């Protein structure tokens, strides 16, 4: 019972300022790049979630010195391909697709077999999407039909490749970008629009990179075998985590919220653009740039009237982790909302399109779902007076947190299993929820 969370009353009006934990994508990328830098790097406000802690464990197993005190972490890198490790090494990526895929790119020069494993959820996810391009670079793989566990053995001479990333996956793009560090020559990536944290870090670190921004894709060129120095980083708050509190506020009554120092990278703010189209007032204050990343305070307040949306597919990649929580807003809209071309949602920790529909159906909202789209028939007067149980969702942290927000704003008597799932990305989520309920 300790791993079950129960809720049976809606949240009361609140007015708060919050500082949310560090960005997960940046935390993982900082760890991996710091492990390849020359010298000691330090990060403040690093996210201490299971995904990030597993990343630290992996680089430690690869012979990198790591020190973590509170939310400050230091890593002593030994340069590109500077890992020193024992034979028959096993790296556990846990629940993190970002870790599992990105670290594969750093191992294309490994001299011995390295096995990468993950939890039940990660072991269901497709790794052929990074195995195939990394094979072209020269690495050898054994896998479970393109899934974990995988065994990777690098090559003495990783070679640059031309690679087309057409799924809009920042993980696949970044895996090849990380591999490119080990190659002699120019790696060329034609990538569908997706998160660009890796590109911004490469620019900041003066890793030779050239990016041409086209309408539907980015053309990225990277010169390999260029060492870079250690670097310090203060990691901003994660907008994917902030999204739950943004939606909690707009769906609540007479509430106002300011979220401080949030990463508003243009490749991550699809949720803000979508919510604005749905008649939600969002203000960005104190906008500034920090080492390539755009940061701001986000102000939002309760909304009474929600417009339905035919969501532009151009916003999909920049909101891919937030669609479950966006669906809750569509449930309150006066009309039919449409979301298309979301097959990438089913490549996450659980088949999220299916789970988004299931949660809405449980609260009385009609949906029509295909393998990559959903129609949501909104009801502005939704009010639940029944028991709802959420379980068997592959411990997907975003399913858990979306269910909590639904319980707090739509009513009903909720029993939500596997609350420990939040440890993968947002350990303080329930603590912050409780602070708003005071």
Image: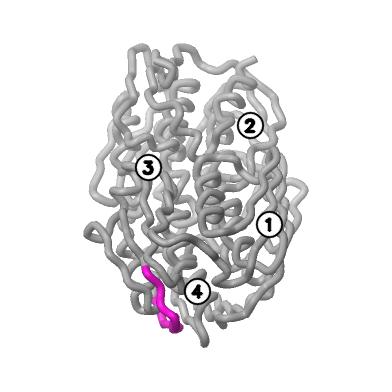
Which residue does the image show at 70% across and 27% down from the upper left?
16
Q: Give the distance between the C-alpha atoms of the residues marked 2 and 3, in whole angstroms.
A: 22 Å
Q: Which comes before the other along the chain, label 2 or label 3?
A: 2
Say which residue label 2 marks.
301
- In front of the other: 348 or 298: 348
Q: Rounded to the nearest whole Å, what is the CA distance between mark 3 and mark 1?
A: 30 Å
Foreground residue among 345 and 329: 345
- Mark 2 and mark 1 residues within 8 Å of each other at the beta carbon: no
Q: Answer few, some or many: residues within 10 Å of disc 2's Cα (few below 14, many 20 plus, some between 14 and 19).
A: many
Q: In this image, 333 relative to 292: left or right?
A: left
Residues tagged 3 and 1 counted as in contact (Cβ below 8 A): no
- Disc nearest the viewer among 4 and 3: 4
First along the sequence among labels 3 and 1 = 1
Secondary structure of residue under mark 3: strand
Placement of 139 over or under 236, stated as above or below:
below
Q: Earlier in the sequence, mark 2 or mark 4?
A: 4
Give the mark, 1 or 4, whose residue is nearer the N terminus: 4
Q: Which residues are magenta?
A: 153-163
Q: Which residue is mark 1?
A: 294
Kindly identify the residue that appears in the image at 34 percent across and 74 percent down. 135
Instruction: Name the residue at 42% across, 64% down.
Output: 172
* Label 2 secondary element: strand
Placement of the N terminus among the 4 image quadrants: top left
Q: Which structural element holds mark 1? A: strand
Q: Marks 2 and 1, Cα distance to the nearest angstrom?
A: 22 Å
State the mark number for residue 218: 4
């Amino acid at each position: 019972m300790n791993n079950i969370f129960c809720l049976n009353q809606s949240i009361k009006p609140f007015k708060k300022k919050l500082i949310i934990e560090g960005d997960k994508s940046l935390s993982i990328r900082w760890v991996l790049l710091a492990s390849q830098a020359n010298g000691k790097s330090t990060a403040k406000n690093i996210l201490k979630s299971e995904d990030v802690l597993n990343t630290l464990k992996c680089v430690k197993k690869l012979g990198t010195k790591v020190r973590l005190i509170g939310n400050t972490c230091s890593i002593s890198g030994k340069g590109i391909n500077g890992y020193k490790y024992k034979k028959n090494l096993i790296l556990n990526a846990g629940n993190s697709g970002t870790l599992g895929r990105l670290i594969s790119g750093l191992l294309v020069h490994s001299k011995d077999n390295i096995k990468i494993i993950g939890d039940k959820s990660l072991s269901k996810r497709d790794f052929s999407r990074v195995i195939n391009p990394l094979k072209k670079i020269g690495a050898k793989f054994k896998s479970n039909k393109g899934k974990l566990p995988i065994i990777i053995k690098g090559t003495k001479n990783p070679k640059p490749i031309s690679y087309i990333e057409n799924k809009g996956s920042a993980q696949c793009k970044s895996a090849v970008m990380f591999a490119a560090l080990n190659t002699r020559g120019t790696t060329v990536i034609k990538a569908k629009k997706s998160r660009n944290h890796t590109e911004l870090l490469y620019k900041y670190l003066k890793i030779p990179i050239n990016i041409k921004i086209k309408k539907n894709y980015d053309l990225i060129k990277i010169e390999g075998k260029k060492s870079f120095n250690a670097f310090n980083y203060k990691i901003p708050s994660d907008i994917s985590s902030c999204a739950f509190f943004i939606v909690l506020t707009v769906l609540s009554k007479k509430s106002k919220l300011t979220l401080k120092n949030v990463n508003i990278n243009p490749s991550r703010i699809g949720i803000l653009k979508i919510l604005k189209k749905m008649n939600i007032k969002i203000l960005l204050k104190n906008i500034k740039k920090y080492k390539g990343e755009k940061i701001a305070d986000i102000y939002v307040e309760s909304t009474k009237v929600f417009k339905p949306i035919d969501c532009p597919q151009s916003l999909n990649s920049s909101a891919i982790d937030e669609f479950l929580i966006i669906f809750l807003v569509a449930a309150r809209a006066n009309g039919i909302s449409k979301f298309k071309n979301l097959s990438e949602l089913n490549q996450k920790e659980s088949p999220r399109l299916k789970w988004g529909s299931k949660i809405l159906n449980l609260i009385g909202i009609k949906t029509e779902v295909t393998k990559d789209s959903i129609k949501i028939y909104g009801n502005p007067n939704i009010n639940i007076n029944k028991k709802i149980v959420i379980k068997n969702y592959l411990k997907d942290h975003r399913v858990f947190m979306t269910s909590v927000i639904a319980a707090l704003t739509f009513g009903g008597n909720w029993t939500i299993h596997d609350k420990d799932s939040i440890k993968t990305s947002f350990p303080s989520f329930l603590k912050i929820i409780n602070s708003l309920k005071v």
